[in-house]
Amino acid sequence: MTVWTERDLPPLHGKCAVVTGGTSGIGRATATALAAAGAAVILAGRNAARGAEALAVIAEHAPGSSVDFEALDLADLASIADFAARIATRQHAVDILVNDAGVMALPQRRTTADGFERQFGINHLGHFALTARLLPLLRRAPAPRVVGVTSLSHRSGRIDFEDLQAERRYGPWRAYSQSKLAVLMFALELQRRSDAAQWGLTSLAAHPGWALTNLFSNGPASEGTPSALMRLMRLGTRVFSHSAVHGAGPILFAATSPTARGGCLYGRSWLWELRGPPAPGRIAPKARDERAAARLWEVSSRLTGQAFGCAERGA
């Protein structure tokens, strides 16, 4: 794979992209680059004030671009349904869906509006439900792509089907790693099911490497005195991390490159995938477990009440 940079983005005029978590960090950097390449971008986020700030920043970096903010709370299935309904009234098709929003290593167990453990509920179940809701619009696009943003921590994750919501035993990093493994397994299973049902989707996953984002402040640093591990991670972040703009590279590659392949993970090429230009990433064997992925899909469908429909392609 040759070195790829944001300058290699193809023209995206006439395409619509939805980016969750698009009001800050890597999501905003992703949205900015897509808008600069000509896509009509919808920023999906909880905070309208942050959305307005993001619109101003993107307008400065991508003058004349088409970018809008729409309220979406991935911790609330009703909000996801409302968001998808609004998008359906204004868009004939969605070409790119980037499932980027997330929370990381919350110190205390918290739940979503629907009673799910918050990391599993937002990082995986919320995006599962959103993708299902947007499937008819995705299928109307000529070459739709869905990108799930995972993490290197998927390698230490385990899907605990007996305690998915961490009701019996909660650990901040354990829950986070499980959620990011679920994101990757969903991306791979979505490609398999698209191939089998001829949905026409290209489903991929990407991770940013070690990027400096607000995940730390919104997650492990959000409550109480930082632990020794947290202080060490902060030091490592200052030394080894790259910016959110640079962190968006693998996501943009997965979302737009003609050479990106469905059912693959894209990350970094250097320093154990922490840094460097976009490159194919190593997928942990557990993420390739098709039986576990099918079980996760069925459980996710039951918990969210979402079955993936069969809208006619090009309808």
Image: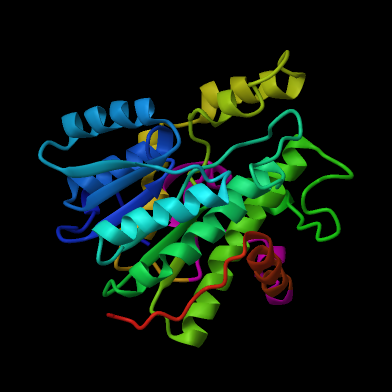
Front residue (pair 105, 157): 105
Report if residue 151 is visible in the image.
no
Which residue is pictured at 28% across the width and 80% down the height? 315
Could you tell me residue 310's position as x and y percent? 45, 81
Which residue is pictured at 65% across the width and 57% down the height? 182
Which residue is pictured at 42% across the width and 33% down the height? 25
Could you tell me residue 21's position as x and y percent? 44, 41
The image shows residue 225, relative to residue 19, as above or below, that is above
Could you tell me residue 238's position as x and y percent? 52, 21
Q: Is residue 109 left or right of residue 281?
A: right
Report if residue 296 is visible in the image.
yes
> Is residue 209 covered in magenta?
no
Which residue is pictured at 59% across the width and 64% down the height? 186
- Quarter of the image with the N terminus in it: bottom left
| Part of the protein shown in magenta | 263-291
The image shows residue 248, relative to residue 227, as above or below, that is below
> Is residue 265 covered in magenta?
yes
Q: Is residue 167 left or right of residue 49?
A: right
In this view, which residue lies farthest toward the top?
A: 225
Residue 97, quarter of picture: bottom left
Q: How is the image coloured?
A: rainbow
Front residue (pair 52, 233): 52
Could you tell me residue 17's position as x and y percent? 30, 55
In this view, which residue lies farthest toward the right?
A: 168
Residue 253, quarter of picture: bottom left
Q: Is residue 226 left or right of residue 4?
A: right
Front residue (pair 173, 238): 173
Count of numbered marks: 0
